[in-house]
Amino acid sequence: MKYIGIILLSMLNIHAGQDLYTCKNARITLFSSALIEDIKAVTSTGVSVYNAATGELDFSVPISSFQFDKAFMQQHFNSDYMESDRYPRATFKGKIQENVDVSNDGTYTVYTRGELTVHGITQTRTIPGTLTVKNGIVYMASEFMVNCADHHIDIPQILFYHIAESIKINITATYSPYKNNQ
């Protein structure tokens, strides 16, 4: 986990002492609502770095960390749809468009524009969210849709009643100020 944080920090080309915040346990929920059944998966292994001075935000989550209620769904998700051996991570690298003063407590509606990479396919996205600052801690939350076809995730015709073509993503993350000794 520390290794992933170092990679994210280097991707942002930043140095200790800037307004850096890190999250090591972001919670991501996938939800597919289809005609026959709903499918839900959850992970709390997302890692992220937020540079409050520039608005830059990097995010990474291991695909195989998603947990399903049914083991066979998890197996098919990893092997058949997401090919997690070949594409082990989903990432987002972007910039929050609004200027947020993290020295003042408050709740802000934000939009983050950047590159979302899922299943090896990168799409430019603007993702809505909420950024809350309270007592020096930064909280972020977002809900958005990902179309399977946009990332070349093939769903066999026979399973269209079981798996939605668009998957709802919910993310909640708590960021603490980065300290060089973390």
Image (spheres, grey):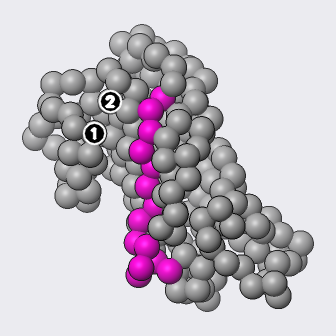
Q: Position of residue 11 (x, y in %)?
A: 26, 46
Q: Is residue 10 left or right of residue 170?
A: left
Image quarter of the C terminus: top left
Q: Nearer the viewer, residue 138 or 84?
A: 84
Q: Amino acid at mark 2?
A: Asn
Magenta-colored span: 83-96
Q: Position of residue 118 (x, y in %)?
A: 52, 63
Q: Pointer 1: what residue?
A: 12
**108 vs 56: above or below:** above
Q: Pointer 2: what residue?
A: 51
Give the Cα distance between marks 1 and 2: 8 Å
| Camera-side mark, 1 or 2 | 1
Image quarter of the N terminus: bottom left
Note whether residue 144 is visible. Answer: yes
**Mark 2 Cα-neighbour bin, 10 Å: few <14, some 14–19, many ≥20:** many
Q: Is residue 158 left or right of residue 64?
A: right
